[in-house]
Image (cartoon, rainbow, N blue to C red):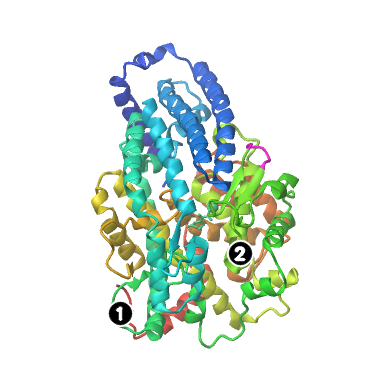
Amino acid sequence: MFKTILRASALLLLLMLVSCKQANDSTVSDSSNPGKLTANDAIDFVVDAEEQLAGLLVENERMAWVYSNFITQDTEMLAALANKKFTAKQVELAIEAARYYEIPELDSDTRRKLNILRSGITIPAPRDVAKTAEQSEIGAKLGGMYGKGEYCYEDGRCLDLGHLSDIMAESRDPNTLLEAWNGWRRVSPPMKDLYARQVELANEGAAELGFADLGTMWRSAYDMPPEDFPAELDRLWGEVKPLYEALHCHARARLGELYGTDLVPQDGPIPAHLLGNMWAQDWSNIYPLLAPLEETSSYDLTSILRERGFDAITMVEAGEAFFSSLGFEELPATFWERSLFVKPEDREVVCHASAWDVDEKDDLRIKMCIKVNAEDFKTIHHELGHNYYQRAYNKENFFYRSGANDGFHEAVGDTIALSITPEYLQKIGLLENVPDASGDLALLMKRALEGIAFLPFGLMVDQWRWQVFAGETDPDGYNDLWWQLREKYQGVKAPNERPADAFDAGAKYHVPGNTPYTRYFLARILQFQFHRSLCEIAGDEGPIHRCSIYGNKQAGQRLNAMLEMGRSKPWPDELEALTGQREMDATAMLDYFAPLQEWLDEQNQGRQCGW
Ligand code: X8Z
Ligand code: ZN
């Protein structure tokens, strides 16, 4: 798949784009005579760029940290200012980098760094100073609107996303669910014009860097020609789609039994408010409705955590202990002093969980409004995975201090979370008796409601954004396109006619927060692939859904060896180092869920599946 010839054609395309840009660009006159520049000039440029960016990055991180822990008008402005400075420098250097591509004797390492410099800006700004400032202000404003979002009921109660999510998870009354679902979506209509303007500006920025649009730029970060990346996603989706369809079919049938087939027609998409989650991206909260009827030997991790008196800190300590058992060094004292673990009462914060390495050395932190439940226990492992990755690559060069690709970064903690098996819970004293094999279906169903249910959502968010960035729809068509894709991929539909001003994409953190989303789709596939290999390394010979690598130093060492590489090698090389495979591959996921697939197929016999 990733043969040299393809990489060469990517480079050719890149050179063509860059040279087209330069032909019209009187400010970059040297590029018309690249002979003047030497490979040493390129190396010096990269070293200098790295120094300039590293300083600004830390300043930007600190501002962003303060802002998202204390949202006020002032911190919003300060965060926007720091972001403007950082983005302007990134863009200036990325454009300058183009001068060096054509130096024939450039070494591959320097070329890789130049490419990362050019394509690694998530949201580039145009060079125009006023536009850069405008774009940073929009970014900060959108983040704040989401972070401060709440819905006020007629009785005067105003609920934030955390509380509305609790309703989505716990209520089985369709009207209560519908109000919470609609309520949260009143937060996003005021974002729509700002978002549309942000797209315009970012596209302008991407064009100045020689990309057709921002979507093409995002797709350029995978060590393959950007035009090949969508086919790679289609391939992976094709492998797992039958499993998703089987799960969908079973969920729809059970929901039809509970809510009636008027509300849940058995031949069409499922109304999005009935799946236990604000975005229908994780269905584990409706596990009791979908559980295999005959299974008895199950356990509820949420109840265990509560009964044992766990709190936010002890949950994070349990996560750290897992990584320590693999041989990773303990988290620094500053992690415990500086992280945000619990939603503060007295100020607005961005609650969406995130992991930080503020000084790019060892100032690791997480920021999360932890609730004592199984979902957040898993998310803690997810966030810690980011922190341990950040620490593992902190000795790499500036441009290599990130994941092999962004899916890798999202997959590390999720891989560890697959090792939270009944045997592991028993080892750490949380479970007295390990359910026998008859409990496997229950475990697999819970995992499928997280991981399999998520896949089409993980895919569709950026399918929407890529079309928006490519100008295939204008702001008037944003919402219709969003629901077309929700239906196409997930087989869910809006529970009611959407209001004319609806901007439902904006009600998902990563859209106003400008975080690419395909990474989570990739992570779902990769986490099982990593897990399978780590279990092999640990010498586990049982079924992979029962394997836990807890305490296995050899597995920890091999994982760390990959993490330490950061982004210094093309991701297929890094994947190969851990798994022996050069392609992302969904077979590990399919193997893991094979017993469930079989059970679902039996259940679905005689049901009409699909939508
Ligand atoms: O955003 C996240 C993490 C932070 S990187 C909590 N996730 C996605 C989401 O919440 O939508 C993890 C799963 C998918
Ligand atoms: Zn993450």
For label 1, the residue is 265
Compared across the picture, whether 541 is left or right of 570 comes to right
Give the residue pinned by disc 2: 371
Tag 1 secondary structure: loop
**Is 360 included in the stretch rendered in magenta?**
yes
Relative to 196, residue 376 above or below: below
Q: Which residues are magenta?
A: 359-363
How many residues crowd mark 2 within 10 Å: few (<14), some (14–19), many (20+)?
some
Observer-nearest residue: 257 or 512?
512
Residue 66 locus on image (x, y percent) = 58, 42
Find numbered disc 2 in the image and state the secondary structure of the residue it sits on. Answer: loop
Q: Residues within 10 Å of mark 1 (few under 14, many from 20)?
A: some
Choose top left, top right, bottom left or bottom right for residue 222.
top left
The disc labelled 2 sits on which kind of residue?
Answer: Lys
Q: Alpha-carbon distance for marks 2 and 1?
A: 34 Å
Residue reaching furthest to the bottom: 294
Which of marks 1 and 2 precedes in the sequence?
1
Examine the structure image and report whether residue 173 is included in the region drawn in magenta: no
Q: Is residue 223 visible?
A: no
Q: Residue at x 38, y 14 (%)?
A: 30
| Image quarter of residue 341 | bottom right
**Taking 605 as reference, is 581 above or below it?**
above
Q: Measuring from the top left, give residue 372's x and y in whole percent.
A: 63, 66
